[in-house]
Amino acid sequence: MFDVYEIRKQFPVLGRLINGKPNTFLDTGASAQKPQCVIDKMLKVYSEDYANVHRGSYLLSEEITLEYEKARKIVQKFINTKSDKEIVFTRNATESINLVAAAWGRKFLKKGDEILISEAEHHANLIPWQQVRDETGCTLKIFKIADDGSFIWDEFAKLLREKTKLVAVTAMSNVLGTIFPIKKMAQAAHNVGALFLTDACQFAVHHQIDVQDMDCDFLAFSGHKTYGPSGIGVLYGKYDILEKMPPYQCGGDMVDHVSYEKTTFAEPPARFEAGTPAIVQAIGLGEALNFMMNLGMDNITAHEKELTKYATEKLSEIEDLVQIGTAKDKGGVFSFVLKSVHPQDMAFILDKEGVALRIGHHCAEPLVHRMGYESVARATLGLYNTKEDIDRLVKAIEKAKTFF
């Protein structure tokens, strides 16, 4: 049974009063709160178990190396990879995508090749490909989405051709909540000989991921959005692709042999994890993913689907509020504007009511402009949110309207 009220008790910060009001945290899309089990696990490692990994021949180092690599196996289970050698730890999903752009894009793309992305991408899945385009001479193509934020298959398909060497798209828009048909898109990409990368930062928080079923070639997500710590991210890559890629960064622990004349590199994933890694953060991520899997991803999805429906209905009842991104079966991301209140003013008033949300372009400036705005407010759901949170959001918005 998924008891959201019992689950909330495992997140200490949710019990804190904000300006004397209940903490109505609706910014999980930016960064999720952490359950006590993650906090306790990381505290224990720092206070009782810390050492460096892979290098020491003493007990603490051997023990923490096992814990660090155990976290990699947890990630393997969470997204169902064939091997834990397909899991590369990074600082965040941004670094994961930049790793692919640098180590795969710069090596394998050339003039005449094409990269295909959508209008709905986060800057982290746009700017790296602009850089690769400028350095290699390849072409960056962008397929359109509908005015309501929906994915349009024909717009995608008409730009997908033999010149396409990579399709890189979000699995779920961080502004619109639109969920893209990743499995079908990956198959279409493969049919023209292209690789397929998906930014799963938003999707991984809410839905079960199976990279073997999706048949994506690369997948990225961040620890801080999946109820884990910041400073740790994941890149999944099919092993036969990873082993053809050169290192992204060079230094210690990613080498096979070093001389003054020449260096040979370790096999993946070590090849892409130069220097001392984010040891405690990786272990904390493993704890967070276990927390989610113990709750049951299907249970999380069902809870948030019901809450998304409730929030959509409640927000639609507010006069002068325009919801941005109303695709069918969207996820729990609600971008909106009030015709009478600037988003910055509204956010200030909502904060006084204990309601946390984000305003701006959400690191997707071209998308927000495409939807017709300079700045929008955004409320995003997590597994700990309740209908009462939505009610407090609506009440606070109505209060904001009275000031203008």
Image (cartoon, rainbow, N blue to C red):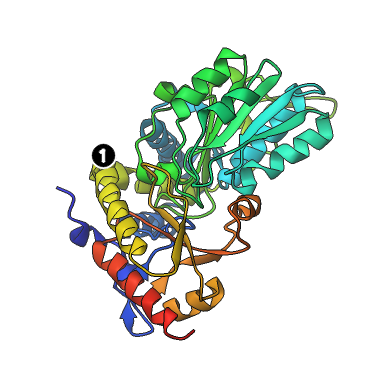
For residue 133, which quarter of the picture? Answer: top right
Q: Residue at horizontal 71%, vertical 29%? A: 105
Q: Which residue is mark 1?
A: 298
Camera-nearest residue between 272 and 188: 188
Q: Is residue 168 above or below residue 184?
A: below
User: At label 1, which amino acid type do we have?
Assistant: Asp
What x and y, as percent, mark residue 30?
49, 57
Question: SS class of the residue under badge 1?
Answer: helix
User: Badge 1: how crowded within 10 Å, few (<14), some, or many (20+)?
Assistant: few
Percent of width and height locating residue 294: 25, 43
Position of 217 compared to 388: left or right?
right
Number of numbered discs overlaid on the protein picture:
1
Q: Position of residue 319 (x, y in %)?
A: 39, 70
Residue sitting at x 66%, y 42%: 126
Residue visible at 42% across and 22% down in the picture: 212
Q: As drawn, is 61 to the left or to the right of 366?
A: left
